[in-house]
Image (cartoon, helix red, strand yellow):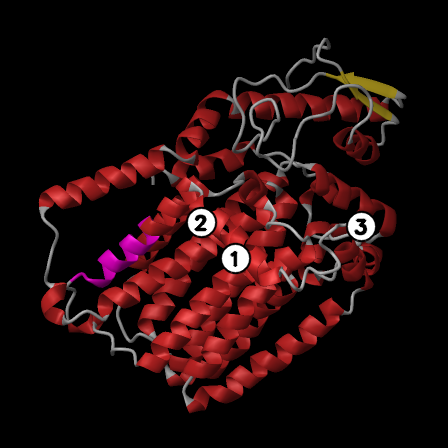
Amino acid sequence: MLVLAPFLLLTAFNQPFFDDFRNAYWMREHGTWGTQLWLFQTWTGRFTTTFIMTALNPVAYGWLAGVKAVAAALFVAQWASLAHLLRALLHTALRGSCSWSRAGWLAALLLGLFCNAAPAPFSFLYWFCGAVAYQIPLIGLLNFTALALRAGWGPEPARWRNAALACFPLLFALTGNELTLVQTAPVLALLGIALPPAGRPKWALWLAMGAVAVAIAAAAPGNWARAAAMAPPADPLHAYRWLVLVPRALYSMALFLLKPLIGVSVLAAAASGLWAGRQPAGAEFDVKPLTRRQWWAVLLGFGALNFAGFLLFRYLVVGPPLLRAQNEMLLVLLLSTAVLGWLLGRQRPRRTMLFSPPPKLSFLALLWLAGLLGAGHAPEAWRELLTSAAPFNAQMQARFAALRAAHQEKRPRITLPPLRLPYGRVLIPLRQFSTDIEFDIDLTPGCEGNINGVMERYFEVPDVCCDKGVELKEQ
């Protein structure tokens, strides 16, 4: 909990960012349904998450602090979805037993490992549009899988109800983001192999519903415009990317796993799952040994689930996955690795399950885990929470108040100071503090810059400039 606490508490200091404002003024210009149609035609077929980013965007209604509530709610929802899936998996297909408290603890451990090692926590946890585009589809995939397991192996009276409920999170998983779409494919394939005969009609329902949803999303003209923008024909690898797709995707995955913090975190997830699987917890935790065919299916599904994202980005952008996509891929990898470790642990003969590591070895393992958590983002999150979060919130509130006043007074220009903070990286990705970020949340010096322009259009001030010599009273 010491690892998760600062990340959750930082949501109380969150602020809107670039796309949050841009989607808000698009709503103002095109209207609720006009915006959906315009984006569908010009940029994206993600019609579910696009609707949330626009029509349900608190910034579109002037509630800038609403992004704090959304970030906190999604953080808790991600944890609850992990717990839901873990408990459903143990209760149904694996015929084990798992209390909500145990599932919640395991989910918190995985989420803590993720937060500590995520390539870019800001673009997954705090940026409203980034959280909607990557967290909500993943939350959909997690809950679809949990409900599908209950529809296949749960109590008989509730199976069709769970199958129908599973259609809603499946819709978000398939149409909310292309990354989650390709991750859903091996999950559906594994369900098709593993579901008992009585579950086949439910699987057919999900396939039919998914095919219609994907067809609508894929038909979006905006998808093709975005694909052309992300991988322009001028790229030297564009013409023959199919020939090098798999080896370059494997290369990207290897580089991803070789990052020290990510690689060690994956090992920690595997070790945690294996340790949990080998605990002598009684006959109710016994799992029927998997056949060789079932093991092949599980391993192939595991590989496809975690490799699909690298393949997708090597085709779409002819490069490694975006950092904000790597966030989601890491969380999926940690979860699937922990489950695979647990399965391996439960397949051990019962006499070896009674083995418990000596106290010295257990102490070294805990020391290693503490060192891992101390070397990642967790100390940075605590540092940002204690030193920069409150000043960041106050300075941004002062900036917004000055922009509102300039709009009301119909001033043609306003000059604002840059953010002055002792530290920023997790919640506040400022270039002055970090070189491996995708975004800068601050204004650009002078009167030009993307964020300057977004502030101009959202607050309806003709010219927004930035000068470090200006002073602004914090609100």
Decide if residue 372 is in sight here.
Answer: yes
Between the C-alphas of marks 3 and 1, the distance is 24 Å
The residue type indicated by label 1 comes to Leu
Q: Is residue 222 above or below residue 131?
A: below
Marked residue nearer the N-terminal end (2 or 3): 3
Which circle's residue, 3 or 1, is located before the other in the chain?
Answer: 3
- Which x, y percent locates residue 253? 50, 53
Residue 274 within the segment the image draws in magenta: yes
351 magenta-colored: no
Q: Nearer the viewer, residue 87 or 295?
A: 295
Picture quarter containing residue 408? top right
Magenta stretch secondary structure, dominant: helix
Give the residue number, with chain letter if any, for mark 1.
250
* Residue, disc 2: 257
Instruction: Give left or right: position of 229 versus 389.
Output: right
Mark 2, Cα crowd under 10 Å, few <14 / some 14-19 / many 20+, is some
* Residue at the spot of label 3: 234
The residue drawn where x is 69% and y is 77% is 212
Crowd class of label 3 (few under 14; some 14 to 19; many from 20; radius 10 Å) = few
Q: Residue at x 76, y 60 (%)?
A: 223
Q: Amino acid at mark 2?
A: Leu
Which is more N-terminal, label 2 or label 1?
Answer: 1
Tag 2–tag 3 contact (CB < 8 Å):
no
The mark lying in front, picked from 2 and 3, is: 3
Up the image or down, 276 lies above or below 319; here it is below
